[in-house]
């Protein structure tokens, strides 16, 4: 039995759920939403509210007061997840793996896997080198006779290929727009050569900061202009005011048709991702939110630009 911890923002949660689907197709598996119940970050767990997703959840086996006690003691969701799995199968011990690290105090035969699918998809394989040292230890338990091959040869297993993409587009099906502004914007995007430009800054400058220094945006914008007639650029950003004041740094000139999508906030922020899927072309950043906005579109003839070293299935990188 395994569990996949669901944490991070919406895009990360979607990646982890895709990983859960692959694992659950082979054997008993749970999601674990305790990280979001304990740490109260982002907009909390969103897959149920947005997509109506239901899955067996380790959090159902822990009361909120127990989780609060873990926090008061300075313990985190890994401890809570292990405890929940021990409740489910009290006669078995738990192997806990977090970002490639094996917690050796717990041995066979249950794996509590805090998923790495986000990094796996970006790189084609898992990014953390130490996971290669962990895998032989896990495989010796015969829990994963298939797992070593899976981890090294599944760049297109979980979310790749036409069949996988169609499945996930059906699972991650957005609810209809209910407000006039988003309805009109989506319609406008469908009726012009719309380009979604994602500019993620505040919480992701630790990795996206280099994109501004390397000239990624001007290169990507020019690439789009060279291949698209009369493009209309829709900017999605957590810092829209900065974008408005620095359009030249993003590669725009005065005559460019640039629009800002800056009204979907807090629990409605997922609408930005939904609008991205209506755009005909995409400029991505290092952000799973950005990636899903491109991937869930049904268009096959997109022009898509991505940063170097990320989103390898995208052919154009700067």
Image (cartoon, rainbow, N blue to C red):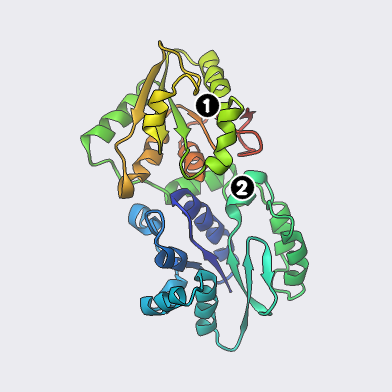
Q: Most extreme residue toward the top, as rendered?
A: 255
User: Image check: 102 left or right of 208?
Assistant: right
Q: Eyeballing the image, is 154 above or below 308? A: below
For the N terminus, which image quadrant? Answer: bottom right
Which structural element holds mark 2? helix
Mark 1 lies on residue: 301
User: Image check: 162 left or right of 73?
Assistant: right
Q: Residue at x 54, y 16 (%)?
A: 227
Q: Which disc is residue 314 wearing?
A: none
Q: Residue at x 35, y 22 (%)?
A: 191
Which structural element holds mark 1? loop
Quadrant assignment, res 128? bottom right
| Residue 302 position in % (x across, y down) | 51, 27
Q: Nearer the viewer, mark 1 or mark 2?
A: 2
| Residue 272 position in % (x across, y down) | 37, 39
Q: Which disc is residue 121 wearing?
A: 2
Residue 278 visible somewhere in the drawing: no
| Residue 200 position in % (x across, y down) | 47, 38
User: Image check: 184 left or right of 78?
Assistant: left
Q: For the residues marked 1 and 2, what is the alpha-carbon distance in whole angstroms?
A: 22 Å
Q: Eyeballing the image, is 180 above or below 166? A: above
For the C terminus, which image quadrant? Answer: top right
């Amino acid at each position: 039995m395994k569990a996949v911890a669901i944490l991070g923002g919406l895009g990360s949660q979607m990646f982890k759920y895709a990983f859960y689907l692959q694992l659950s197709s082979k054997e008993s598996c749970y999601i674990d939403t305790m990280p979001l119940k304990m740490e109260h970050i982002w907009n909390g767990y969103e897959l149920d509210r947005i997509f109506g997703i239901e899955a067996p959840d380790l959090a159902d086996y822990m009361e909120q007061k127990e989780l609060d006690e873990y926090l008061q003691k300075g313990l985190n969701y890994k401890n809570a997840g292990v405890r929940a799995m021990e409740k489910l199968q009290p006669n078995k011990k738990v192997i806990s793996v977090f970002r490639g690290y094996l917690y050796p105090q717990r041995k066979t035969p249950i794996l509590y896997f805090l998923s790495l699918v986000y990094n796996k998809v970006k790189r084609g394989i898992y990014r953390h080198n130490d996971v290669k040292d962990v895998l032989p230890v896990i495989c010796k338990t015969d829990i994963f006779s298939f797992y070593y091959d899976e981890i090294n040869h599944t760049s297109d297993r979980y979310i790749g290929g036409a069949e996988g993409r169609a499945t996930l587009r059906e699972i991650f099906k957005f609810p209809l727009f209910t407000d006039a502004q988003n309805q009109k914007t989506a319609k406008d995007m469908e009726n012009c050569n719309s380009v979604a430009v994602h500019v993620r800054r505040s919480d992701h400058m630790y990795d996206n900061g280099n994109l501004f220094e390397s000239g990624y945006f001007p290169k990507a914008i020019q690439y789009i202009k060279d291949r698209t007639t009369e493009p209309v650029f829709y900017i999605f950003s957590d810092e829209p005011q900065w974008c408005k004041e620095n359009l030249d740094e993003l590669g725009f000139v005065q005559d460019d048709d640039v629009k800002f999508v800056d009204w979907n906030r807090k629990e409605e922020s997922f609408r930005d991702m939904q609008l991205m899927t209506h755009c005909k072309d995409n400029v991505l950043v290092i952000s799973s939110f950005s990636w899903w906005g491109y991937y869930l579109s049904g268009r096959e003839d997109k022009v898509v630009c991505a940063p170097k070293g990320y989103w390898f299935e995208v052919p154009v990188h700067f």
